[in-house]
Amino acid sequence: MKQYTDLEYLKLSKGQRLLYRILSFLCAIPSKIGGLFGALWRLIKGAGQAVANETRDIWLTFVNGDWKTKLSFLVMGFGNLARGQILRGLLFLLFEVVFIGYMILAGGYWLSMLPSLGKVGPTEEYNMIFDTYVTTYNDNSFKILLYGVLTIFFIIAFIYTWRVNVKQNQMAEKILATGKKLKSGKDDLRSLVDDQFHKTLLSLPLTGIIIFTVLPIVFMVLVAFTNYDGTHDGYYNNLFTWVGLDNFNTMLSWTAGTGSGTQSYAATFGEILSWTLIWAFFATFTNYFLGMFVAMAINKKGINLKKLWRTILVMTIAIPQFISLLYVSKMFAKNGIVNGFLMSMGWIEQALPFWEDPTWARITVIIINIWIGIPYLMLITTGILMNIPQDLYESARIDGANAWQQYTKITLPYMLFVTGPYLLTSFTGNMNNFNVIYLLTGGAPTNPAASSAAGTVGYTDLLITWLFKITTGAESQYYLASVVGILVFVVVAVISLVVYNLLPSIKNEEDFQ
Amino acid sequence: MASVKLTDVKKIYDNKVTAVHDFNLEIADKEFVVFVGPSGCGKSTTLRMIAGLEDISDGIVEIDGVVVNDLQPKDRDIAMVFQNYALYPHMTVYDNIAFSLRLKKLPEDEIYEKVTNAAEILGITEYLTRKPRALSGGQRQRVAIGRAMVRNAKVFLMDEPLSNLDAKLRNQMRAEIILLRQKLDTTFIYVTHDQTEAMTLGDRIVIMRDGIIEQVGTPTEVFEMPRNIFVAEFIGAPKMNMIDTELVKEGDQYFVTPFGAKLEVTGDKKNELAQKGVESGAIKLGVRPEHMVLTTEAGESSIPCKLEVNEMMGSELHLHVYTEDETRLIVRVPTINLSMEQRKQLTYGAQLYITFEGKVMHFFDKESQLNLIYG
Amino acid sequence: MSEMQNSRRHMGLKASRTLANTAIYAFLIAISIIWLIPFVCIFLQSFRVESTHQVGYVIPQQWGFDNYINLFQTDFPRWYMNTFIAALVTAVFQTIIVLCMSYTLSRFRFKMRKPLMRLMLILGMFPGMLTMIILYRVLKDLGMTQANSVPGLILVYVASSGMGYYVSKGFFDTIPKSLDEAARVDGATRFQVLKKIILPLSKPIVIYTILTAFMAPWGDFVFARYIAFGASAGKNVAVGLYDWLNKDQISKCYTMFCAGGVLVAIPVTVLFMCLQKYYVEGVTGGAVKG
């Protein structure tokens, strides 16, 4: 494709410029993908390099180290203890003892069971004394998977700590060689509120995140490769086990009748995904533009009682969503207030199918979401609108711009620029907006082609509510929910990555500053 | 009250950008040293490494003979004044100044003594109960200095303390810093991008560019004996004129031939050139604007040129002229040397002739940019 | 002549401005009504005595406090306490955790900072709901589900709250770093910097964090429902009131739902309106920072 210079580009007409930009964007895609793979390759190479460097460093530490260092390779913290750093030494030693103890008592077992996820399920035996069948519970797949993962985390932590232990010996030797003193336990404690204060501050939040976010996510990703569901709960009825990519095949196969209702899972997934994207798009942008409009209306010169208008809207943020959403949902029901009002006024003959007709339902959901979202967007945009330098408008007015031109040429570019990242997070947030959909419609009206005894799928279901329904449905197909979850992640990640790279506020940070 | 010594100090950022290359400097007790250079030259980074606010990538920093590389700022016994003052907005002026003393757990009456004393010296006594936001720029600056003063620290660091003030206030504060220095009698390290500040304040000036020290010397040294073209151009305003020309050695005499003229090198410069055994060749000739002189007529020793811009600065005129080959030069002429009649003729396009003496010339190598005599 | 033209043009400008303003006032009044109607309706219907099911009119024919009195015959007070305790405890701990996290990421430059932030960005892209399955089973093993759901809920709310550091990090980023540096040169440890310099300057963000942390549990539906798992004693208000609106109960409990809604909304709204200023600051700052 021909590359224009700046001056040539400026000579093009408006349409040509647009065409040129679209073409050059499309042409750049292969190289961008190439760049991605390049980055990936560099990452892998870098990781390999790092491992090699670390190994060599460890080896050199061992070869060149004194006997204290050498013994530390086996007994963690020995070097610290021998060199007078009692506190550090004891902590290292304690960690090693705990680790070895754990591995012998439990970790080894969990790890050995991980490849099979349990061998013996619950057994029933006839008990002659009581003349009844007695169930004995044996292996627990759930626990094996959970503690297996935990054990792997623990092993990684141990390797890291061991590496730190080796490094500390190396450093200590170096420091002692220059004739300086090592830090004492008191120094270490003091540094925890000073130069190492970040470790103190992060310890609590990170522990929480690792145990309650990272571990569950790793676990649930792994569940996608098992057959864990209501009938294979891993302990009480049947064990569950690894099934490889089977679940992904099920989800992405186009063969009808394999699962979700009468149509294939892939078709159902496709339908829900496209509605999710449509929903996210409208939910984000209707709110954004209408919110901005309301903010501008309130901000307009000559409008009194600004505070009152704002307060009325803001108050609705405070009321918990489940109250307002549930109530509004009932207002639009067949026998609800809205239909009652319209009928009593004689404007309609029979109740409007707000929740019964797929298209009506989808539009109603989006409109009610506007009602939910505008106060919030009004707040956000008010702040930013007031930050737009007034001289931009003054200059535009002198240049002869009317109100609409001022809006499209100054306000909008500025707003889009500043709120670009927010729009992205808001889009992905709406994709996963469980509350609004679930409380308003619960996914209704039902899509018969996609529903089965195992669970209903509705026309307003998002991927996230579908996921919820799968897990709480009759068969509790956790493995399927996990596959959906992973796919949601992939979709969100791809969108974020692409948009993030296109956003002007990331690329030219200084434009409007 | 301490010496500072930097040995091979380096700063390399995470993105592998080297901000400061092997920095070597010894600062004597009670010396006032100024780091000066264009923005991004590493002067602030160096100062912040001395303060302990930046990690030292390599090398050794010593204060009073003690290696401080691994010490936290609070353990280095330094005081610092920041460019944006960094006053604690939620504390009164009194509490701002007293903050460090309270951390040291001094008794309150001693703190009172010290704070009011410092406030007295700086003339901010009446503002002691105000919050920083109620102060003007100059007053904030004084509070910031007061906060550093009461510390009685070994080293006094100042990071562009005057650059947020307007020109008039800046001149005033500059004078006050000189007075302050007499009173405190301690080691000062001062960072600025303004060569005037550097020249007026420093016992010694460290001129930096791209993380490298270009020259260290007293104000006189860096002004009169610039080590290279960068220093020559950086110190002095307007900057030194640079002319591509030839140095010609004839017997034991040296000549330069700018724009067809032929000027003899005289005085010390000639002797020093001879001593160094400099031969004929192409050079860059540097002449400060104030050393250029207007003459009335053409001749072998004058350069013909045309006037482009005439800036009236009050006591002197800055004449921007261009020669036949479009080289731009600046000439500083004291207003008093010109008659009213002569000044009227100095309009756009006027034909002028300029010349300069042999003893004011600076000679630089074209390639290495080093001063042929002092480089 | 020209004077007259001028004044006419002036009049025209003024007239069009008045027209525009009138239109805007009409618009603002209209949206105010639309926004307030549902809440007015809930409020009015909570006093309806003549029937307990959904009706097509708004103003009760018979007024009374029956619905409120009936509320106390149900598990509603228990749900209310569950939610209140969860909200209170969550507010305290979540604020501490979020502040630790955001302050650290704003002020300290350590090797793992960037990777950590990237990791949390990626973790945030996983639907959080997915983790419920495992959290439920783990909490169940610990005996923190169903009737004893409150500690479990608190644990879940608080544990991952470090991920929501963005807004307050944005706030801390606006406090000049040179304040920290000046204090450190003045002899303060990092801890003292936080205590004596940063915290006194962070009142708005502390209040914002407390407020949002306190409000979230009132609206939480998914986790609460999962963890309570049908046990009435373990429900929070959202789950409890939701269940009143399912097909079997709605005809009995509709007006009681309205009364419950009013009781939930009032304290939260009052608190919110008092601290509105800080909320607005936080929200606006957070959106710009992304």
Image (tube, helix red, strand yellow):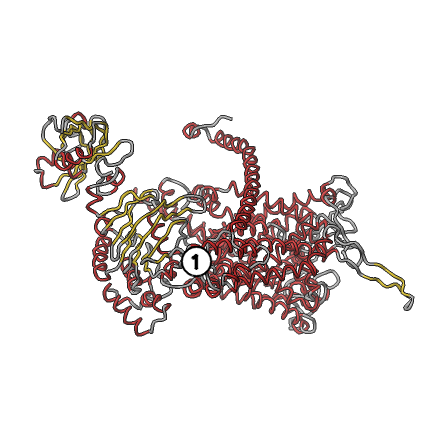
Decide if residue B54 is on the left or right side of residue A89.
left
Seen from the viewer's position, the closer of residues A454 and A344 is A454
Give whichever of A200, A416 is nearer the camera: A200
Residue B155: image quadrant is bottom left
Q: x%, y% of residue A228?
A: 74, 52
Is the residue A408 above or below the residue B137 in the image? above
C50 with respect to C262 (left or right): right
| Residue visible at 34% across and 71% down in the picture | B106
Q: Secondary structure at mark 1?
A: loop
Does residue B11 appear left or right of residue B163 in this picture? right
Q: Position of residue B153 (x, y in %)?
A: 30, 62
Q: Position of residue C41 (x, y in %)?
A: 61, 63
- Is residue A474 visible in the rendered image? The answer is no
Q: Chain of mark 1?
A: A
Question: Which residue does the numbered mark 1 point to in the structure image?
Answer: A304
Q: Position of residue C266 (x, y in %)?
A: 57, 67
- Residue farthest along the front direction in this orientation: A67
Q: Residues within 10 Å of mark 1 (few under 14, many from 20)?
A: few
Type of amino acid at the residue the image marks with label 1: Asn
The vertical placement of A447 against C227, above or below, is: above
Q: In the image, A273: left or right of A379? A: right
